Image: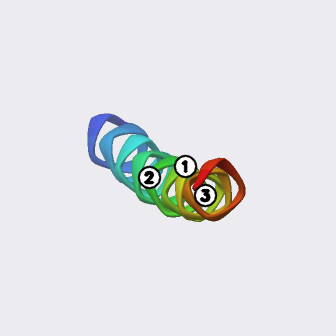
Amino acid sequence: TNRIRSNLVLNYTKLEFHYSNKSHSKHDGLDS
């Protein structure tokens, strides 16, 4: 279960990073 849990956390972190990157680029375009 530990390996599965860490895998889930890893995938979630990747998704979070991906989406935060997208929103950041959107904000950059709007701000400037």
Q: Cβ–Cβ below 8 Å for labels 3 and 2? A: yes
Q: Alpha-carbon distance for marks 3 and 2?
A: 6 Å
Q: Quadrant of residue 14?
A: bottom left
Q: In which quarter of the image is the N terminus?
A: top left
Q: How crowded is mark 2: few (under 14 residues within 10 Å), some or many (20 or more)?
A: few
Q: Quadrant of residue 9?
A: top left
Q: Residues within 10 Å of mark 1 (few under 14, many from 20)?
A: few
| Left or right: 2, with 25 as reference point | left
Q: Position of residue 2 (x, y in %)?
A: 29, 35
Q: Residue at x 55, y 63 (%)?
A: 25
Q: Cβ–Cβ below 8 Å for labels 1 and 2? A: yes
Q: Which amino acid does label 3 sit on?
A: Tyr
Decide which of 26, 4 is in the foreground and name it. 26
Say the numbered circle drawn on residue 17.
2
Q: Which amino acid does label 1 sit on?
A: Ser
Q: Alpha-carbon distance for marks 3 and 1?
A: 4 Å
Residue 32 vertical placement versus 9 (above, below): below
| Left or right: 10, with 27 as reference point | left
Tag 2's secondary structure? helix
Q: Cβ–Cβ below 8 Å for labels 3 and 1? A: yes
Q: Which residue is drawn at 50% across and 63% down?
A: 18
Q: What residue type is labelled 2?
A: Phe
Q: Which residue is drawn at 53% across and 48% down?
A: 16
Q: Where is residue 8 in the image (x, y as percent from the top left)?
A: 47, 48
Q: Alpha-carbon distance for marks 1 and 2?
A: 5 Å
Say the numbered circle drawn on residue 19.
3
Decide which of 5, 24 is in the foreground and name it. 24
Tag 1's secondary structure? helix
Tag 3's secondary structure? helix
Decide which of 1, 17 is in the foreground and name it. 17
Q: Quickly name the residue at label 1.
A: 20
